Image: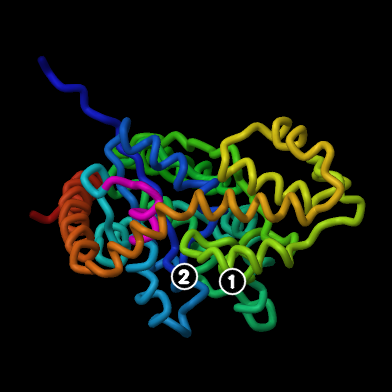
Amino acid sequence: MKSIKKQRMLTGDRPTGNLHLGHYAGSLKSRIKMQEEYDCFIMVADVQALTDNFTNPEKVKKNVFEVVVDNLSAGLDPEKITYFIQSEISSIAELTVFFSNLVTVSDLQRNPTVKNEIQEKGHVFKDGVVNLGFLAYPVSQSADIAFCKAEIVPVGKDQKPMIEQARRIYKKFNNLYDEVFPLPKGVFTEVSKLNGLDGRKMSKSLDNAIFLSDSLEVIKNKIMSSKTDTDNTIKYDTENKPEISNLIMYYQIVTGEPIEKIENKFSNNTSYKIFKEDLIKKINLFLEPMRKRKEYYIKNPDIVWSLLKIGNERANKEGQKTMIEVKKAMKIYYK
């Protein structure tokens, strides 16, 4: 019986620090499910991380290992995933150059995701001057997806403009030259934005996150000092009670319980302290197996680097095949 070829999925992480609960809710959880159904490529996006960390490339290099370990620790099977490093795949850089001819500067300036991230990372860009690499990273992301002809791209809802940009680039390329690239489908996770402990978007750079590697003591300190309102009612109401609603969302993520059930469980609660203490226990129970897996990989780093070596080799082979098609379509194939 002929085996059915799996569709290819691509997603990735910027190596700028350890992954946190927001990453789990927004991407890792769906990756764990998708690894059973798809041919999964997971990229460590070091080139894109350099667009706003160009003065500190050592930080980016150090976190390549950490990001892969966090993925493995979350439950992603190394036998089912192709892990690779963006800067090791030359076809991505080539495609970025070719695709840049198909996008206008005004297109990039209008991109809502880019505009929001520029606002969030204003401290990186002095006097509001944004470097070309950051402005153009949707083009690079389009190349990430295209080099291996990924058909499925799981992202948060805030990344929807990026998928739309990529599809426009592929349509223009296919119409101008030849049909080379499939139009990928964005799979948008239900949780697109998880706020941090201070009410702002959960972020590594803002130091307001629950990290997947946090110890019980760290979790306790973070949760007990997190923001709440004054009426002690455990109610999910993002408009009037955003802080406690955010903590309820944490509870829902780590337990899988519906929000209504969580509200009922604490309906007679007279203190946020009781809720927070239970939340600490639930987060710790959720993260404990991840911490154990992470400890194993940290003690055996050669396993991680071997996975990346194998993944880089496979990704490069796929990219080379794609580039032959691309150059033939563009009539610049000289072999």
Q: Residue at x 58, y 49 (%)?
A: 282
Q: For the residue carrying disc 2, how many other residues have a C-alpha within 10 Å: few (<14), some (14-19), or many (20+)?
A: many
In contact (CB < 8 Å): disc 2 and disc 1: yes
Residue 241 on the magenta span:
no
The answer to whether 237 is drawn above or below residue 100 in the figure is above
**Quadrant of the snapshot with the N terminus:** top left
Q: Determine the residue located farthest toward the left in the rendered image.
A: 335
Which residue corresponds to the image point at 60% horizontal and 78% vertical from the top-left? 124
Q: Earlier in the sequence, mark 2 or mark 1?
A: 2
63 sits left or right of 52 in the view: left
Q: Is residue 120 left or right of residue 7?
A: right
Residue 100 appears in view: no
Whole-number angstrom distance, CA of label 2 to CA of label 1: 8 Å
Q: What stretch of residues is rendered in magenta?
A: 69-77
Is 148 in front, or is 215? 215
Label 2 belongs to which residue? 16
Give the labeled residue for mark 1: 205
Secondary structure of the residue carrying tag 1 is loop
- Name, please, the residue furthest toward the right: 231
Instruction: Name the residue furthest top.
Output: 1
Q: Can residue 271 be seen in this snapshot?
A: yes
Helix, strand or loop at label 2? It is loop
10 Å crowding of disc 1: few (<14), some (14-19), many (20+): few
Q: Amino acid at mark 2?
A: Thr
Q: Nearer the viewer, residue 225 or 116?
A: 225
